[in-house]
Image (cartoon, grey):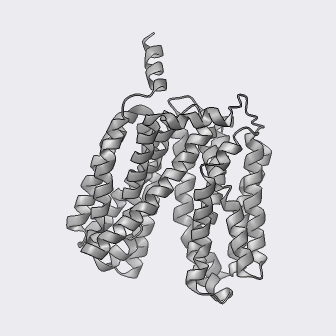
Amino acid sequence: MTKNNLIVFILTIGVFSILNTEMGVIGILPIVASTYNIEISVAGLLVSLFALAVAVSGPILPLLLSKYNRKTIMIISLGTFFICNVISAFAGSFWLVLVARVVPAFLHPVYVSLSFAIASSSVSEKEAPKAVAKVMVGVSAGMVLGVPVMSYIANLFSLEIAMLAFALVNLIALALTIIYVPSMPVKEKMSYGSQLKILKDINLWWALIAVILLNGANFGVYSYLADYLERVSLLSTEFVSITLLIFGLANILGNVIAGRLLSQRPLSFVGIYPFLLTVLFLAMLFLGNMGFVIMGIVLIWGILVGCAANINQYWITRVASNVPDFSNALFLVATNVGTCIAAFVCGIFIDEFGINNVVLGGILFTVLSIGFFFAGIKKSPKEKMLKVNKAV
């Protein structure tokens, strides 16, 4: 394994360890509620406050820490996650667990945005989407495996062992980072003002709105997928679980596919994606009541959602490639904003038209995204320069 490939591999494990901590707790909320004798809604603060901390720190901390040695920031981030997960395992109070969850959450966007930036810069311009796609696998794996695996561990052993399992994955990533990742001092330190100047670029705002809409289209509908599969597709609980697992594993495949397509024909791939997603939602609208057909649709959708994660990251960073840490932080903020807004809008569609029409909300967001994608589909300055260099 070459040095650059090893670094990307370590970043993937690190991102997985952080997403595993974020998402895995969803599978053990009932056990948390029972252990600390609290309502499940109170236990849910472990999820909602973690997300809030990510949203608050997303546009701020990556920018503030952009001047410091990247390896140092990675070690601090992973070390904080490790220590706080150990504290959670032995905490005698739920409120101590909550604090131990929220503190590392502020460093979530720091590490993840840094990972995308390092992966992208570790290879050539053309190969950057493939490197980022490999790190995205860690995101998908954390989302897919975190919930069922941690739920299994907690039920088989105990809540403490599950929390220590979070810490173990953090520790592995931390050890690999300390041993194998070289020092990464920032050679060209940019002032905060020079980085914030990118916010004056109208193309960045087209990209941000497009990403908000596209991510909202996918995860606004996905937020209600389990309920949709039970009430519309009439799948049993077991088949709902299987279908959700299929969706998650297909995400990983989508990451690989997107990495290759974004390296070869990025603008064509981005241009056609919203239309593919619209067609899929229409198929879901008219065929969603057919049990095994919907499982096939969800499989294809899972691949497309995996592709969307890479498209969203690529679309924002191509515009703001000169401020990689800040642009990747904006990517994380935009995707979370899209999920929050679309989940609310899709909920309105459910209240007004029923759960079977939740995909109408997804179609609305997808169609709206098309205009903003095409507004910014012209080549970025860097892409134009590469074309000139090739001609020369």
Q: Which of 375 and 259 lies nearest the eye of the viewer? A: 375
Total number of numbered discs in the rendering: 0
Q: Which of 334 and 22 lies nearest the eye of the viewer? A: 334
Q: Is residue 259 visible?
A: yes
Does residue 220 sit above or below 270 in this rendering?
Answer: below
Residue 309: percent from left, percent from top: 46, 50
Q: Residue furthest left?
A: 286
Point out the image quarter for the C terminus.
top left
Report which quarter residue 189 is drawn in. Answer: top right
Residue 227: percent from left, percent from top: 37, 76
Residue 366: percent from left, percent from top: 31, 52
Point out the image quarter for the N terminus.
top right
Please state if 300 lies on the left or on the right of 155 as rendered: left
The residue sitting at 61% across, 35% down in the picture is 195
Q: Which of 262 and 87 lies nearest the eye of the viewer? A: 87
Residue 171: percent from left, percent from top: 75, 59
The residue sitting at 54% across, 42% down in the picture is 132
Q: Residue furthest top?
A: 392
The residue sitting at 37% across, 30% down in the picture is 378
Please state if 366 lies on the left or on the right of 170 as rendered: left
The residue sitting at 78% across, 37% down in the picture is 183
Does residue 111 sit above or below 199 in this rendering?
Answer: below
Please state if 110 lies on the left or on the right of 126 as rendered: right
Q: Is residue 234 visible?
A: no
